[in-house]
Image: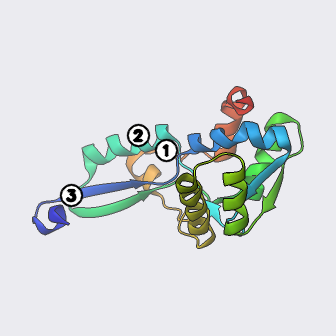
Amino acid sequence: MAIAASGLDFTFLRNHIYAEISLLGAAPAIGSGQLYDATNGGGRSYVTRTDAARTAAGALLTAEGRAIFDVTGPTAVTRAELAAEFAKASGKPVARVGLTGEQLRGGLIAAGLPEGMADVMVAFDVDAADQYHAIVTDTVEQFSGRKPETLAAFLAANRAALAG
């Protein structure tokens, strides 16, 4: 990496999965009552774009040295927990349905997703199963002075968007 080899100070912020992404699957999950995944119970530390922006502003003002920070939400949320949040927000039952990667891929393709996109989505779930998305840090609080918003609070604040 050229920047690291340059000898200059740098701060890289690696934003984890945005909480806003969870809204994309809300309407189908609430409508069908099922949230499909191949995460094998692995969680994701969703972070809001607002928290990521506050973190970036704080890092611009205060970061020093040569560092890389993961910008995460306060906890890793499993798909079962996300299904429960969808149910709570909608008043309708939503259950997590765990699948293998191949089963998920087949279902996505049968639903009309191009094979390449289905492969990306399955790989994303497999990475969650391997705990790559479950990293939790204090970076948001460190640079913004605020604790990151929970996914539950984000979904409650965006309840109108859950219907699609």
For residue 88, say whether it is visible.
Answer: no
- What's the residue type where badge 3 is placed? Phe
Check if mark 2's residue and mark 1's residue have beta carbons within 8 Å: yes
Measured as percent of width and height from the top left, residue 121 is found at 58, 56
- What's the residue type where badge 2 is placed? Arg
Q: Is residue 61 above or below residue 119?
A: above
Q: Residue at x 37, y 60 (%)?
A: 69
Q: Residues within 10 Å of mark 3 (few under 14, many from 20)?
A: some
**Numbered badge on residue 54:** 2
Q: Residues within 10 Å of mark 2 (few under 14, many from 20)?
A: some
**Numbered badge on residue 10:** 3
Tell me the quadrant of the picture where the N terminus can be found: bottom left
Which is nearer the eye, 2 or 68? Answer: 2
Check if mark 2's residue and mark 3's residue have beta carbons within 8 Å: no
Outermost residue to the top = 160
Q: Residues within 10 Å of mark 1 (few under 14, many from 20)?
A: some
The quadrant holding residue 53 is top left
The quadrant holding residue 30 is top right
Residue under circle 1? 146
Q: CA distance from mark 3 to mark 1?
A: 23 Å
| Labels 3, 1: front one | 3
Image position of 97 (left or right of 162): right
Measured as percent of width and height from the top left, residue 140 is found at 45, 50
Measured as percent of width and height from the top left, residue 159 is found at 72, 30
| Labels 2, 1: front one | 2
